[in-house]
Image: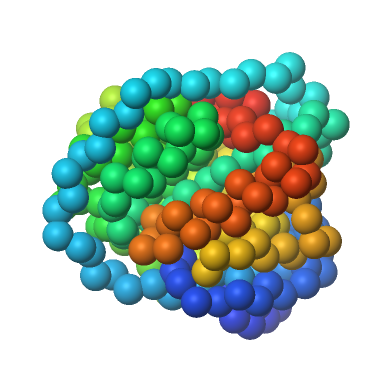
Amino acid sequence: MLGASLLAGVTGCGVGDSTTPALTQAPPSTAPEVPGANGAFAPGGEVPTSDASPSRTPTPTATKRIRRTFIPDYQLPPVVGGLAPVITKIPTKHPVVFLTIDDGNIKTPESVQLLAQYDYPASLFLTKNTIAENPSFFKAFEAQGSLVENHTVTHNINMVQQWGYQQQFNDILGMQDYALQQYGRTPTLFRPPGGAYSNAMRQAVAAAGLKAIITWEAKANAGKMDYQVGNALRPGDIVLMHFRAEFAADFAAFREAQLAAGLEVVLLEDFLGVA
């Protein structure tokens, strides 16, 4: 286990928080992150969200599938010593940015329509308990060019502190099996609830067959962009969004920042070779 004290303010995926603590330490093969209690590490700035889900939303129809490609100038680090690598930012000279969207709580047709309209593929880190009432909703995102990844079954933001290796492994593996059943593909990337991780989690992620833990340094939140480093998007940034009521406003903030930076939205899995 690594670290000494839990990063203040890191809780879970959700609405409201617009501050992002500075980063002070770099774990292996990542951009800087902050170590915390019980061996936990976490990027800054995720906050709680309600577990309440709206009534069942009709599945939107996607009209196209876009998979942009660049010749990668970065190679995903391998699992070493049974520990999955942690990726916070992609070191690349290409003018690319990677969009990731978490949870699946709020399901509105406009979300997939916006991604399809602007040809933005995204990595969808979904949680079983937030999508189980309507998992087919997210199939339209796959048709549009996005991919479903693993954000656990339960979204326990305290799993690093509360659970040992076996419970973490079971929760991660449960989402692997569910995603395969629902979407016909086994996820290759994992995002911890709340962002905190530990060596036990890295071990569980690797044992479940996933290639890497994905965190972030920039996010679209409450209709604006928040940055842990700098004040604009940079090549290789991994951007965090959520399926929330304010999805359209967050998407608009991300698109404005992406265009201002002269970056192209590409699929993280394609760039890493794990699609």
Near-viewer residue (173 or 153): 153
At x 22% / y 64%, what residue is drawn?
A: 53
Tell me if 153 is positioned left or right of 36 in this view: left
Q: Where is residue 252 in the image (x, y as percent from the top left)?
A: 55, 52
Residue 33 picture quarter? bottom right
Q: Which residue is drawn at 77% across and 38% down?
A: 262
Q: Position of residue 77 (x, y in %)?
A: 71, 34
Compared across the picture, whether 177 is left or right of 92 comes to: left
Compared with 46, 200 (above or below) is above
Image quarter where the N terminus lies is: bottom right
Q: Is 1 left or right of 143, judged from the image as shown?
A: right
Q: Is residue 196 left or right of residue 162?
A: right
Q: Of residues 50 and 213, which is closer to you in this image?
A: 50
Q: Where is residue 113 in the image (x, y as percent from the top left)?
A: 37, 38
Q: Look at 14% across and 60% down and name the residue there.
A: 55
Q: Which residue is drawn at 62% across and 40% down?
A: 98
Residue 270, given in percent of the width and then of the height, sits at 58, 24
